[in-house]
Image: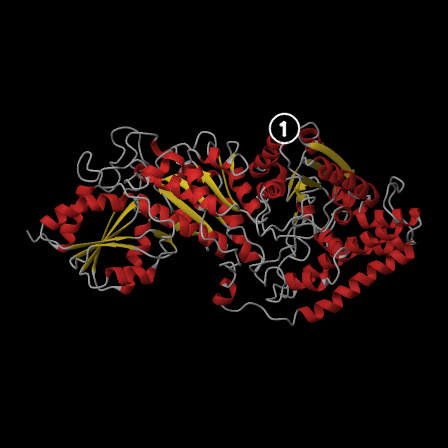
Amino acid sequence: MDRTTIVHDNFLRRVAANDLPSGAEPAGPLGAALAVSIYRSGCLSRALDLKSRAMQAKRQGFYTIGSSGHEGMAAVAAALRPTDMAFLHYRDAAFQIQRGEQVPGQSTTWDMLLSFACSSEDPISGGRHKVLGSKALNIPPQTSTIASHLPKAVGAAYSIGAARRHRPDHTSLPDDAIIFCSFGDASANHSTAQGAFNTAQWTSYQSVPLPLLFCCEDNGIGISTKTPRGWIGATFAQRPGLKYFTCDGLDIFDTYATAQAAADYVRRCRKPAFLHIRTVRLYGHAGADVATAYLPKAEVEADEANDPLLHSVRLLSESGAMRPDRALKVYTGAQARVERIADEIVTRPHLETAQEVMASLIPPTRDCKPSNGPNVEARANAFGSDMRAMDEPQPMSRLINWALTELMLEHSEIVMMGEDVGRKGGVYGVTQKLYDRFGPDRMIDTLLDEQSILGLAIGMAQNGFVPMPEIQFLAYLHNAEDQLRGEAATLPFFSNGQYTNPMVLRIAGLGYQKGFGGHFHNDNSLAVLRDIPGLILAVPSNGADAAMMLRECVRLAREEQRVVVFLEPIALYPMRDLHADKDGAWMRRYPDPTERIAFGEVGITGDGRDVAIVTFGNGAYLSNQALPQIEAAGINPRLVDLRWLSPIPKQALDAAVKGCKSILVVDETRHSGGVAEVLMAHFHETSEAKLARLTAKDSFIPTGPAYAATMPSADGIVKAACELAGDKS
């Protein structure tokens, strides 16, 4: 017999016979009416679990990771406020159901069944995934099973205090809110979770407000791997800066009282806490998982005997809130209600086309207060002596600094965060003076953890800020890339555009640093960024373009709520000369603050028809170096600076190379998986021109004199262009 049937039959039989498990007497502040409400939520959660498996068997449902054994989470929801944003573990259906009781006008059963069925009418994901979540209930959807939502919960908690000091227009959380974040005991061991705990403690230790309640639902097992008995308590009970609370999740009275005490501590003290809740896991991990295949049958039966709904029936009876016979009717009534609603749900529509699926990849635009930029006095005060230098050509790093200053003056919701971004002024000095200009609230020096840097940005973005996090080197992004792939970019997709986390992520990257750092500081691989749906990737090649593109990137984040990565070529930060020593030909004047380079706008130099050199970043610099020799060979070139690498601006590219007999793609990323692959494919499909590409080798970059040996060079560009177009000299 299936374990779900066994648990169900056991409940019916034992309640009817008043054969209930023993336990502590009901105690604490939980009143009778609320206790009954919590029990009802648990019964509804159980009924939904049972129905999800029946729906899957009939190919009417598509998700069976259930919440059975975790029904006590309804008591936690009852102890919190609906204004407390909740990042939920996937076993927290009872939490969402109970929160639905706190907000008028909810149809939680209907909504959750739509999600099980992946109906396009599902109010949170639009049929894209079975997720817990509700805009009305302040529950952003989470799809992760490995605690990758914890870093952004830290960021959201930090944003509450930050918003009190600098309130963005689109703030959604009240000043007295706390952030709730739940996860399983197995996920607590994940490096992402450990980084989030450490960041919360690091912040709390410095008395920085962080109203965050972590909640570990400890059922003692992760799929089939057991959590050592006592491990969670032993590792979390004595952590500095993180107050520990524990309760028995099988006892709704104990759970409510403890959760209320933990929430009160976090709300009063504005410090993080860790709520450790004992739970059991019923039915195995998911529908296809059979727990008795890897656990002794006696152990599985022992958990089933500790069914939290059986404990709730006893507690309700002993407290005088509800007799067992009435509790049984509530349970069977929930089953009947779910059956009745599910019969209608399975007739509701589903997503059918790629266009429908992708409709929420791009978040909706939002209204922002218009701005004419900073006034003259504010600008003069911020720039000081730099004002005199603005009429003179400057290297890229300085023009980026000025653009950042201008943007932060104009938009008070912009905050920057990263290791060394504040007092030091960035690892390459790009953010120098910004700390003095805007203070520590807006220039946040973080601990050394890329996951936490991006989590801080994602969480703050969900409370109205426009974050500009910095990752010091492109290679360091790989420590945290899932924060972009699995969290930031997916949020509008899985929330049907209801939740967004706009940001402009600045990364120093690419190669050509002379003899410095090796592959950790010279990383020329962009593939991890280019294959994230909805993400915008921008790469400037000179200082003026960098300033104007940065303004557009902030507009895209602020108004269109996009996730943007602004990749700054390290080797071009200090670049002054182009052809000869001290010619200053690669420096630019600071463009007027009103000037922007629009998203998808490419740069075109020359109008030659013999060969179009399509490139970006350092490739644009090297191609400009190569132009005189190419022209000397009698070849009339045209140079196209791509600028926007994801999505590729296909129409602008086609227009830029129109009329050219040949196209040479110069790509400083690797031959395999590099940018040239998509460009070659695109031009093959849309152009009759002869095609060739010059790329970096499939290699890491070394330290020392061979720093550029694997990369395109100016001489290599000359040779490739002449071979492609034909030397006419």
Q: Position of residue 586 (x, y in %)?
A: 25, 41
Q: Most extreme residue toward the left, as rendered? A: 729
User: Which residue lies at the image location 43% right of the left edge and 45% below the top edge?
Assistant: 376
Task: Please identify the quarter of the rendering in which residue 577 is found.
Answer: top left
| Residue closer to the observer: 606 or 37 | 606
Q: Amino acid at mark 1?
A: Tyr
Q: Is residue 684 visible?
A: no
- Quadrant into which the N terminus falls: bottom right
> Is the residue 618 above or below the residue 269 in the image?
below
Residue carrying label 1 = 205
For numbered disc 1, what is the local secondary structure?
Answer: helix
Q: Is residue 336 visible?
A: yes
User: Which residue lies at the image location 27% right of the left edge and 37% below the top edge?
Assistant: 575
| Residue closer to the observer: 297 or 644 | 644
Q: Position of residue 492 (x, y in %)?
A: 54, 56
Label 1 environment density (alpha carbons within 10 Å; few <14, some 14–19, many ≥20): some
